[in-house]
Image: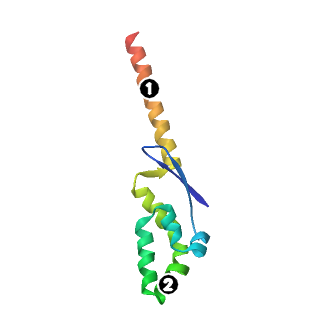
Amino acid sequence: MTTVLVNKESEEEKTIPSGFSWTTLFFGIFVPLLRGYWPYFFGLLILCFFGGIGIFIAWFVCPFLINNHYRDHMLKNGWTTKEKHLEKKQREDEDRLFRQAMLAKAVN
């Protein structure tokens, strides 16, 4: 399953997978680094430096968590789901058309 997120300002779209992250299992801390997800990257980096149980958490537990954390991080930083974005855009279009109709009616 995936979630499509849309940036409110630039209308850029990103597809975020949900559930287990195979890429994180295979590539570890490089996934948040390449995504630009800095808090998670530095957290995993610190866990890896501690060694022992930290490496286990970074490599085998984090793949279960990273996609949901990344989605929540994006939602807090100016992104919205595509469904909500389309609903908002449709409401704005309907409001604009209504205002135009009322203005045309008032002019006539």
- Is 41 positioned to the left or the right of 15 in the image? left
Say the numbered circle drawn on residue 45: none
3D distance between C-alphas at marks 2 and 1: 59 Å
Q: How is the image coloured?
A: rainbow
Give the residue furthest to the top.
108
What residue does disc 1 label? 98
> 65 and 49: which one is in front?
49
Q: Is residue 7 above or below residue 38?
A: above
Residue at x 51% of width, y 76% of height = 62
Three-letter code, disc 2: Ile
Residue at x 50% of width, y 69% of height = 66
Q: Is residue 27 above or below residue 51?
A: above
The image shows a total of numbered marks equal to 2
Residue at x 44% of width, y 26% of height = 98
Q: x, y (%) of residue 23?
A: 60, 69
Q: Quadrant of the C terminus?
A: top left
User: Do the residues bearing badges 2 and 1 touch, measured as CB atoms within 8 Å?
Assistant: no
Three-letter code, disc 1: Phe
Q: x, y (%) of residue 103?
A: 39, 18
Q: Is residue 77 above or below residue 66?
A: above
Q: Tag 2: Cα neighbours inside 10 Å, few (<14), some, or many (≥20)?
A: some
Of helix, strand and loop, which one carries label 1?
helix
Which mark is nearer the camera, 2 or 1? 2
Q: Tag 1: Cα neighbours inside 10 Å, few (<14), some, or many (≥20)?
A: few
- Is 102 positioned to the left or the right of 31 in the image? left
Give the residue furthest to the bottom.
52
Q: x, y (%) of residue 63?
A: 55, 74
Residue at x 43% of width, y 83% of height = 49
Choose the circle earlier in sequence order: 2 or 1.
2
Of helix, strand and loop, which one carries label 2?
helix
Q: Quadrant of the N terminus?
A: bottom right
What residue does disc 2 label? 55
